Image: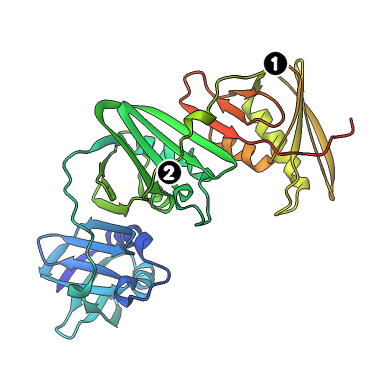
Amino acid sequence: MKFICSKANLLHGVNIVSKAVPSKTTMAILECILIDASANEIKLTANDMELGIETRIEGEILEKGIIALDAKIFSEIVRKLPDNDVVIETDSNLKTTITCEKAKFNISGKSGEDFTYLPYIERTDFVTISQFTLKEMIRQTIFSIADNENNKLMTGELFEIKGNQLKVVSLDGHRISIRRIELKDTYEDKKVVVPGKTLQEVSKILSGEAEDEIRLFFTENHVVFEFDSTLVVSRLIEGEYFRIEQMLSSDYETKVKINKREFLNCIDRATLLVKEGDKKPIIIHIEDGNMELTINSQLGSMDENIDIEKEGKDILIGFNPKFLIDALRVIDEEEVSVYLVNPKAPCFIKDENETYIYLILPVNFNAVNR
C-alpha cells in the first residue's frame, strides 16, 4: 500500500476515529486504526465493539492496500509531523513507513484482514436534522445522564420520534432533562436509547453549522450517524425506557419568573462556599416579588436576594445547587419560569411551549433559622 495526503487531512481523520479506540481491551487489534486504501478512497476506521467510527480522507492512492496501525503511536506520530504532505507506505511484512519532509518513521503494522469491521447496516430510512440542532440537543441534556453502570438505561438518552417531533430525554434519578424540536418532515414513530458515550463523541465531531445536515438511521440494535465524510455506528441500549409522563405534572402552587443570568450567577457565587463532594443545599425562600437564596457550610454562609415575579404561594425549598446550575447554563432564554408545588415535590424549569423541561428533585434540609 502506498498513498500520499496532507498532514491536516490525515490528522483530522485520525482525531475523528480515535474516539472509538478502546482504552482497555483484551483484543490487541482493536487498539489499532485501520487504514483501508484497497478501493478508490482512503478510509480510516476504529471500533471498540460498542462504538465504531469510519471516516474518509482526501489523498492520492499510489498502490492499493490495507493495514492496521497501533492507534496511540500512529496518532502521536501524525500529530508531530511537519505541516506538509505525508507518504504512508507498507511492505509485504506489514512494515509501515511514514515520511513527511525529512522525518521518516518505521513502525510495524498488523494485518487489516484481522480487524473487526463495523457491522453492516442497511441505510434506507433515515431522519435528517441539522448538525447545529443535534449538537445543541445533546449539550442541553447530556449532563443529566447517570455515570454509573448500575442502571444501564440511565447512562443513555431516549430518542423518541413521533410524526414530525423529536424528543430527547435523559435522567439520573435526581433530575430529568427534556428537549423537543420540530423536524422538517414527518417520520415513522421510533423510540431508542442511545449510549451517552456515543452522543458525547458524536457531539465533539459535529461541525455545529446550521446548514450542515446529519442523517440518523435506526435499526433494532444500532443507530448510525452519517455526516460529512464520517459514519458513526453505535449499539443501542436494550430495554424499556422509564415512563416519565407520570412525573411531568402540570400542577403547581407557585410560579416564579426570574432573570436567568442573575439566578445562575447567584447560585454560582453560593457554591464558592461548598467544598468538592460536600452536599450542602441552596435554600430558596420565595415571597412576593423576592427570592432569597441562602447557603451555610463549614466555610461560611451567604445570602442574596433577587427580584422576581411570583404567582401563588410562598415557599421554602432546598436544592442541590449543581443541578440548578447545570440546567440554567444550557437555557438560552433571558428569563426563565420555575414551577413549584411544595418543598418535597420536584420543581420544573420550562418554557411555555415545553421545548425544554428540566425537572429537579428538592433536597430535604433541616429547618433554617430565619
Above or below residue 153? Residue 15 is below
- Residue for badge 2: 157
Q: Say above or below: 174 vs 200.
A: above
Q: Amino acid at mark 1?
A: Lys
**Seen in the image, is 122 located left or right of residue 304?**
left
Q: Nearer the viewer, residue 231 or 221?
A: 221
- Left or right relative to 254: residue 28: left
| Cα separation between marks 1 and 2 | 33 Å
Name the quarter where the N terminus is drawn: bottom left
Residue 137 in picture, x, y percent from top left: 43, 37
Instruction: State which tag comes first along the sequence, 1 or 2.
Output: 2
- Is residue 357 visible to the viewer in this orientation of the structure? no
Residue 236, position in %: x, y?
Answer: 34, 50
With 319 as the anchor, is 30 left or right in this view?
left
Label 1 sits on a secondary structure element that is strand
User: 370 left or right of 58?
Assistant: right
User: In this figure, which residue is indicated by the disc labeled 1?
Assistant: 310
Q: How many dots with numbers?
A: 2
Secondary element at tag 2: strand
Mark 1 surroundings: few (<14), some (14-19) or many (≥20) residues within 10 A: many
Quadrant containing the C terminus is top right
Residue 240 visible to the viewer:
yes
Question: With respect to residue 187, does 273 lie above or below?
Answer: below
Q: Residue at x 35, y 44 (%)?
A: 207
The residue depicted at 67 percent of the width and 18 percent of the height is: 253
Q: Residue furthest bottom?
A: 93
x and y percentages locating residue 142 in the rendered image: 48, 44
In the picture, the disc for residue 161 is: none
